[in-house]
Image: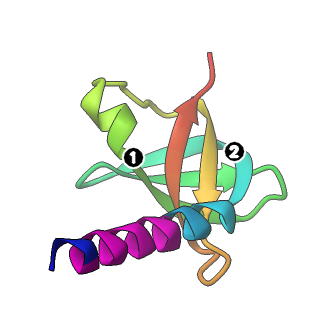
Amino acid sequence: MEEAFNRHEDKEKEVLSMSKKDAIEVTGVVVEALPNAIFRVELENGHQIQAHISGKLRMNSIRILEGDKVTVELSPYDLSQGRITWRKK
């Protein structure tokens, strides 16, 4: 029974890692801070999206302010929302 659980767990990890590979990374500038740790980010191509802070940034208490250059991870399924994964100095 334990073997079946472990196989399922391994498959779940594979699915998670595949979705991260499909993500599109772009850079942009934070234009506006919205409620609930959501930010409006203007991308290099001029489009504006809404993005939230990734777990690692939140865990390490990285503050993001208006005007910061950030790297955003976009899902190929919804290009209007993203996740801020890095704040550039």
Counting from the top left corner in percent of width and height, residue 25 is at: 71, 53
Q: Which mark is residue 53?
A: 1
Distance CA(mark 1)–CA(mark 2): 14 Å
Counting from the top left corner in percent of width and height, residue 53 is at: 39, 46
Dot 1 surroundings within 10 Å: few (below 14), some, or many (20 or more)? Answer: many
Of residue 43 and residue 12, the one placed in the foreground of this image is 12
Residue pictured at 39% horizontal, 73% vertical = 12
Residue 67 visible in the shown view: no
Q: Is residue 87 above or below residue 48?
A: above
Q: Which mark is residue 28?
A: 2
Part of the protein shown in magenta: 4-16
Q: State if disc 2 and disc 1 touch (CB < 8 Å).
A: no
Residue 6 on the magenta segment? yes
- Tell me: 25 left or right of 13: right
- Tell me: 75 left or right of 56: right
Residue pictured at 58% horizontal, 61% vertical = 20
Residue 58 visible in the shown view: yes
